[in-house]
Image (cartoon, rainbow, N blue to C red):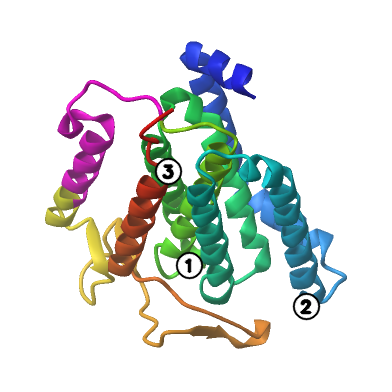
Amino acid sequence: MTKIFNWLSAHKIVNVAIAVVYYLLIVLPHEQVGRAIVNLFKTKSRAYYQHTVLLIGVVALCAVLLFLAQKIKNHPYRTRVLIALSATIAMMILSFNLLLVHNVEIIHFVQYASFGFVIYPLFRNANKTLFWCTLAGAIDEANQYLILAPQNTDYYDFNDVILNQLGAGMGLVILFALGFYNVQRTKTKWYLSAEIITSVAIVISLIVMYVAGEFSYYMPTQGDAPLFVLIKKVYPNFFTEIKHLNVRFHVVKPYAGLVIVALIGVFYSFVLRKPKKE
């Protein structure tokens, strides 16, 4: 794996091409994948579907833990790896009780853990990898919300943004456990980094859209609907229930979502920071 990462780091154009193709494979076929899953389980009950997907997820997680067990045991920063891994698993379990409508949504973890593997060689830096994975996940959700299926949802889905970020975090924890540390530093001032410039550009774009009447937190009661409305319909209770599916979940509001994403980012930035001694 080290040889592959080194080769990709030395051939960044190829790495970017692979990352773009992989990302498009995540983003574009949402509807087709959804229909395929429905057809696969159409003769089964929802309980069977939920339990089957959960079992597959648990087995996959156990396989990953078994694969990492010996490496963690001999790891020079074992405590840090265990903290990162335990916290990530805990957040994933919490998301089952709060954020998921269907258990198949655990695919977010797999997709963005894998995406983290793909783009890590570009940066050799955990913070940068997590930033771009999180941004990619946010764009993925915006694509679904604004383009693929605007009629199927009442809000920009920060739930899925968080799931995407946790998937990327798990991918980085696995890489850290395998010995890929945050080793590459750039000489660019932090405020001139691509991540800061991109963040500022996004904020400025949203401000311009707001001033132009094309961005809004809530759906306005009068006039034409803006191009981008974060919340079309307000769900006042902590839990939203879908009675015919016998499911309830929490809809993360945008302000809370931004805070959660920031806190998760700070956690991984701290726990996956570059070791003082290599």
What range of the chain is rendered magenta? Answer: 183-206
* Magenta span includes 186: yes
Which quadrant does the N terminus fall into? top right
Q: Are marks 2 and 1 in contact (CB under 8 Å)?
A: no
Residue at horizontal 20%, vertical 45%?
205
Q: Name the element at disc 2.
A: helix
Q: Is 48 displayed left or right of 107 in the figure?
A: right
Residue 275 x, y percent position in the rendering: 40, 36
Which residue carries the number 3 mark? 272
Look at the picture and state if 157 lies above or below 202.
Answer: below
Residue at horizontal 32%, vertical 25%?
185
Residue at horizontal 50%, vertical 61%?
87
Q: CA distance from mark 2 to mark 1?
A: 23 Å
Which residue carries the number 2 mark? 47
Q: CA distance from mark 2 to mark 3?
A: 38 Å
* Magenta span includes 2: no
Q: Quadrant of residue 188?
A: top left
Residue 153: numbered disc: 1
